[in-house]
Image (cartoon, helix red, strand yellow):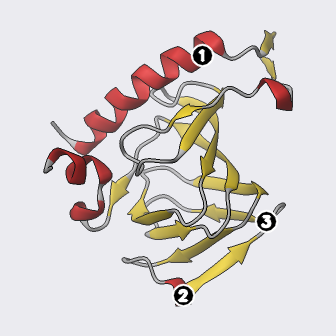
Amino acid sequence: MSITRLVTASLASLVVGLIVTVPAVHAQGHVLVPADKVQWGPAPPAFAAGAQLSVLEGNPMESGPVTLRLKFPANYDVAAHWHSMPERLTVLSGALNVGMGDKLDRQASQKLEPGGFVSLPAKMHHFAWTTTPTIVQISLQGPFDIFYVNPSDDPQKRSSSR
């Protein structure tokens, strides 16, 4: 099974649950999700254990606008990866260290604090890491995918080889 299909399958189960349970107001094309109503669930297996995901808008498995939030614990790494679509990320709380390249390099990254923003073009190799609990919001055009530069960094492959 390809990585894209695995990511899609894992997102499918999460999205179905979150779309059904998010107490958002959907009326004539607008979405309203009060901060205290954001529903979190475990991030799909394409992310290492510990991350949580909330789908605020759209369906990550389908074409169209998608807004996600990811919650990372302290000392969390996202290995070098890329997406087939542009990604726009805003830090909401904590701090996210972001860098470009083919491997996670703490010396070659920049710290983004709340309000910090990064826009990444499709296929740009990038990585991220935290030292404190951090929440980010990501906007993109679905369907969402993630490809690790080094396939052995893919959490799905690490967990399936155990």
**Cα separation between marks 3 and 2:** 17 Å
Label whose residue precedes the other's in the sequence (3 or 2): 2
Q: Position of residue 67 (x, y in %)?
A: 66, 37
What crowding class fits label 2: few (fewer than 14 Cα within 10 Å), some (14-19), or many (20 or more)? few
For the residue marked with disc 3, what is the amino acid? Answer: Gly
User: SS of the residue at dot 3?
Assistant: loop
Res 22 → quadrant: top right
Question: Residue at point 27% right, 34% down?
Answer: 5
Between residues 145 and 64, which one lies in front from this camera angle? 145
Residue hosting label 1: 19
User: SS of the residue at dot 1?
Assistant: helix
Name the side, left or right, on which 28 lies relative to 47.
right
**Cα separation between marks 1 and 3:** 28 Å
Contact check, label 1 and label 3, Cβ < 8 Å: no
Name the side, left or right, on which 78 lies relative to 38.
left
* Residue 116 tag number: 3
Res 40 → quadrant: top right
**Cα separation between marks 1 and 2:** 37 Å
Label whose residue precedes the other's in the sequence (1 or 2): 1
Residue hosting label 2: 108
What crowding class fits label 3: few (fewer than 14 Cα within 10 Å), some (14-19), or many (20 or more)? some
